[in-house]
Image (tube, rainbow, N blue to C red):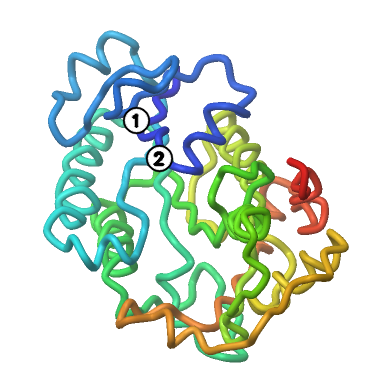
Amino acid sequence: MNLVIGTSGKIGTYYQKFSKLNNNIYASRKNKLRNNFKFDFTKNKFLPFFKKFNFKSVVLFSSISDPIKCKKNKILSKKVNIIYTKKLLNFLISNNIYFIFFSSEYIYPGKKNKIYMEKSNLNSNMIYAHQKIEIENYIKFKKYENCAILRISKTYGDNINDSSMFSNILSLYKKGQKSFIIANDQYFRPLFVKDLVKIIDLFLNKKIQGTYNVCGDEYSSRFNFIKNFFKNKKINDVKIKKCSIKIFDKKIFFPKYLNLSNKKIKKTIKFNFTQIKNGYRKLCINS
């Protein structure tokens, strides 16, 4: 039996809907989510819940993952992303339970002309990234190997309401917005969220251990991704203006160049990542 904690977020919502595993139990602090147990890992006691279902694996989606919210709510984000996460990890480690922890591409410095492997140095001025680095270091300090750390790149989906990169901009277009200001100096490898769902299932089935970058194959700027998206959808009545990511940053410290290598995970699980144009294929003006 697998426990999936924190299914109210974007990735957790996709995972609950599209996972092929029948032995997953989903838990969330929000009590109105369908087929979810109400379980707030910052308040509830772990032992009774784990004894009831005899969980062998845990997927940890629970976190405050928006860097802006982490900066605005430093105390709360520290409690959720560090203090309570360590408390839960201590329980899992002491009971030798396999878990998947989600880290972020933001933990890398983001230097130009640098390809980031799993062994690359970690460094960031971003509060959210610091929190992820602290938990990664904590797991290493515990010398616990029965787990996986997945460093996730920016995800996108194919649901118009999921607020991800392409969905959000298409939604704005449908509401009448025809002009967009897009950063042309922020580079990354977008990850189709349904690929991540498949990867999590594979890791749970095989109890794969280790640290992995999880990102798509295509590396470009946000500006180019959005421009090509409109071109692919044959939307010609928009104006896209280039700008620097600095105008959106507000001392969040978004890294500019996140050229992650996904060679390790592709070799480990023989996985083929979805091409971006195929990932957002379901998104259309009339969706």
Q: Which residue is mark 1?
A: 97
Residue labelled with disc 2: 146
The circle drawn on residue 69 is none
Badge 1 marks a residue whose secondary structure is loop
Q: Residues within 10 Å of mark 1 (few under 14, many from 20)?
A: some
Task: Provide the secondary structure element on which disc 2 rests.
Answer: loop
200 left or right, relative to 9? right
Is 136 above or below relative to 259?
above
Q: Count the marks: how many?
A: 2
How far across and how far down the image is residue 196, in percent?
A: 61, 45
Residue 75 lies in quadrant: bottom left
Q: Is residue 82 left or right of residue 236?
A: left
Q: In percent of the image, x 22 and y 37: which residue is there?
A: 88
- Amino acid type indicated by mark 2: Asn
Above-or-below relation of 165 to 10 = below
Q: Nearer the viewer, residue 232 or 261?
A: 232
Q: Quadrant of residue 27?
A: top left
Q: CA distance from mark 1 to mark 2?
A: 7 Å
Reply above or below: 106 against 96.
below
Q: Residue at x 62, y 53 (%)?
A: 171
Q: Residue furthest top?
A: 52
Q: Residues within 10 Å of mark 2 (few under 14, many from 20)?
A: some
Residue type indicated by callout 1: Ile
Give how far across and how far down residue 135 sits, in percent. 28, 57
Q: Along the polypeptide, which appears first: circle 1 or circle 2?
A: 1
Q: Are marks 1 and 2 in contact (CB under 8 Å)?
A: yes
Position of residue 91 measured from the top left corner of the image (x, y, whole percent): 20, 33
Identify the residue at image location x=44%, y=15%.
Answer: 35
Is the residue 116 above or below the residue 148 in the image? below
Image point (42%, 79%), residue name: 248
Where in the figure is residue 249, as x and y percent of width and height?
39, 80
Q: Quadrant of the N terminus?
A: top left
